[in-house]
Image: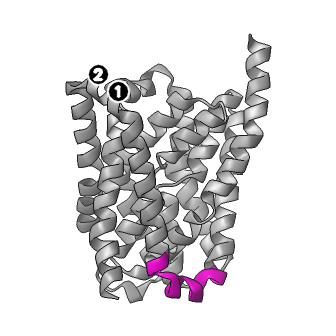
Amino acid sequence: MEDSTILTTLVLPLALAVIMATLGLSLTLADFRRVVVVPRGVAIGLANLLVISPLLAFVIAEGFGLRPELAVGLVLLGASPGGTMANMLTHLARGDVALSVTMTAISSLAAVITVPLFLELATERFGADGLGGEVEMLGVVARVFAITIIPLALGMWVRARRPERVAELYPRVRRVALATFVAIIVAAVIAERERIDHNAADVAAAALTLNIAAMSISYAISRVARLSSRQATAIAIELGIHNATLAIAIGATIATVLTIPAAVYSAFMFVTAGLFARLMYRRNAEADVEVA
């Protein structure tokens, strides 16, 4: 139990900070200016990610009748920003990588507001009294800021100072960050396996429904809004690959039961998003040929 506590409260946040710093190494201020350059795609994508996704989590938690703590954990996952792996899958699917990177960057910044906000709303809505007084807005804001914004900014600062060196080392650093991400998720699942086993049946269906519904609805909204297939692909994958590491790290500092939905979600999100990427690869390739 002590090893599990050290993993979720110390090792996991530190690993997440490393991953966010790596994301910062791939970003420039131009990624944030893209909000002004291509506002419609970014606005629709962020509306899906920051509003529709957490609201879907509320509805699904209600629909599946999850017990309060698990319902709060599902909303915490739904409110988490897009994960860095979404950028890679978007690239493999021939989606709009620039849009994907922009959404990941901005949603990571916005997480300082959105994650604590929806966490507090979910705690009140589902009456998760078992969490006690641990869900305190200012404390959660500070945690999200410390493990996302600071390392992200540090990575961007290093890139701005040493762009050539970063360009040379980034592929290697990215592989290390990816391995760290996978290792930490696996370790977190193993550490909490007993608790997950007891709740997997309750959470798995709800988490899978959230994953598929979020990708499907966001893709449909994007196409109805007349975004290109490549833009819609980027948005849908961003909705499918959440920063589950952040959800686990924040949840672990409040109550370990909150980490269960994110841990279960992590077990299959790459499979569903990967299948979607494979499907869209051919469609986007054909669209590129038609445009050419």
Label 2 belongs to which residue? 164
Residue at disc 1, secondary structure = helix
Whether residue 200 appears in magenta in the rendering, the answer is yes
- The crowd level at tag 1 (other Cα within 10 Å; few <14, some 14-19, many 20+) is few
The amino acid sitting under disc 2 is Glu
Q: Residue at x 37, y 84 (%)?
A: 131
- Magenta-drawn segment: 190-202
- The crowd level at tag 2 (other Cα within 10 Å; few <14, some 14-19, many 20+) is few
Res 167 label? 1
Residue at disc 2, secondary structure = helix
Q: Position of residue 227 (x, y in %)?
A: 66, 28
Q: How many marks?
A: 2
Q: Residue at x 52, y 39 (%)?
A: 87
Residue 219 seen: yes
Q: Residue at x 55, y 64 (%)?
A: 266
Residue 136 seen: no
- CA–CA distance in space, label 2 to label 1: 5 Å
Q: Residue at x 51, y 23 (%)?
A: 38
Q: Is residue 212 left or right of residue 43?
A: right
The amino acid sitting under disc 1 is Ala
Give the quarter of the image for residue 119: bottom left
Q: Position of residue 275 (x, y in %)?
A: 72, 49
The vertical placement of 216 against 127, above or below, is above
User: Residue 59 versus residue 185: which sits nearer the camera?
Assistant: 185
Res 23 label? none
Residues at discs 2 and 1 in contact (Cβ within 8 Å): yes
The quadrant in which the C terminus is found is top right
Q: Is residue 244 left or right of residue 142?
A: right
The vertical placement of 10 against 115, above or below, is below
